[in-house]
Amino acid sequence: MQVKTCGIMQSMRRNLFLYLALACFVGLIAIFVVDGYLGTYDTVYITAGERSLKVEADVWQRQYPTYGGPIYEEEPMSVEGDKGGYYMGANRDEKISFRYEVDNRVFSTYKADIEASVWHSQEKVRDLISRPISIAAFDKGELEWVVDNTELLPTDILPEQSYQYTVIIKRGEIERRIVVFINPAGYPRKY
Amino acid sequence: MQLTYVLYGFGVLLCVAGIGYLAAEYVKYMSEIGKLLALLLTVGMFGFLGKYFEELGW
């Protein structure tokens, strides 16, 4: 009888270790899910002409650039230095509207200064917006602005020439870059 | 028969390597506290699994 009880106890003890190991595994998966959900995430919604683009928060974390829309470029674009950047194409006469959304998924209020500006050849062309934001816990905040391509194009640019500028969004210490390629007048071609 | 076990072992190794790779990629984007907790739980998981196999007599 005593031997049988001892065997049952040993079996329970053995199973307890297995259940604890399983509990640790479930906890590990739970941490992966919760940690992925919690945080401050920013998404940019872009509307150029009839096209709507969504630059999701994971784009900024990528080790390679992301492309949106038809882009005409004669020279190959650099890849190495543009990790986490977003490239998009636009036409000359378009107005591009940007909506920058910050999703605060933490237990405290998020405060930061948001600045957006247009850059070309490492020089600032114009400021688009500069505003502090304060977002309550598990809430969203957003800012909007519009860029008119016709105002940014140089006056002496030829119709067959392309142009590019970068919209840099600064949120505190964090910087997001969206490179806008203004295609030549005849692009994209119609077949 | 033995060849079958070798193939099983190879399959299990590939699965573990694949899960390990995915986990390593995911961990890159985790917060510091999340990494610490995940490390503690991983140590706990292997520790308890080791004890389980020890109790089995391995």
Image (spheres, rainbow, N blue to C red):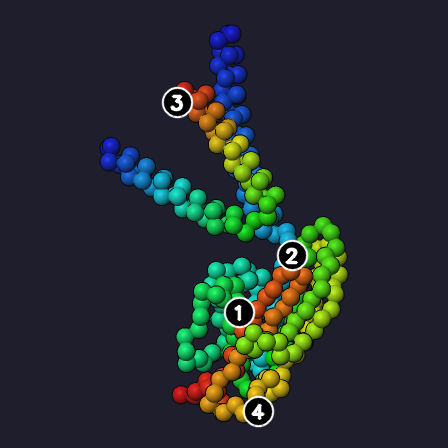
> How far apart in space, not on screen, are marks 4 and 3 (Cα)?
80 Å
Q: Is residue A155 left or right of residue A190?
A: right
> How far apart in space, not on screen, are marks 3 and 2 (Cα)?
47 Å
Q: Nearer the viewer, mark 4 or mark 3?
A: 4
Q: Quadrant of the C terminus of chain A?
A: bottom left
> How far apart in space, not on screen, are marks 2 and 4 (Cα)?
41 Å
Q: Is residue A107 left or right of residue B27?
A: right
Q: Residues within 10 Å of mark 4 (few under 14, many from 20)?
A: few
Question: Which residue reaches farthest top?
Answer: A2
Q: Nearer the viewer, mark 4 or mark 1?
A: 4
Mark 1: amino acid: Tyr
Q: Are marks 3 and 2 in contact (CB under 8 Å)?
A: no
- Chain bearing mark 4: A
Mark 2 lies on residue: A40
* Discs 4 and 3 lie in a common subunit: no
Q: Residue at x 47, y 29 (%)?
A: B49
Say which element carries label 1. strand
Q: Quadrant of residue B12?
A: top left
Mark 4 lies on residue: A155
Mark 1 lies on residue: A86
Q: Position of residue A57 (x, y in %)?
A: 58, 61
Q: Is residue A131 left or right of residue A51?
A: right
Say which element carries label 4. loop
Q: Residue at x 71, y 55 (%)?
A: A138
* Discs 1 and 3 lie in a common subunit: no
Mark 2: amino acid: Thr
Figure check: A22 above or below A29: above
Figure check: A21 above or below A79: above
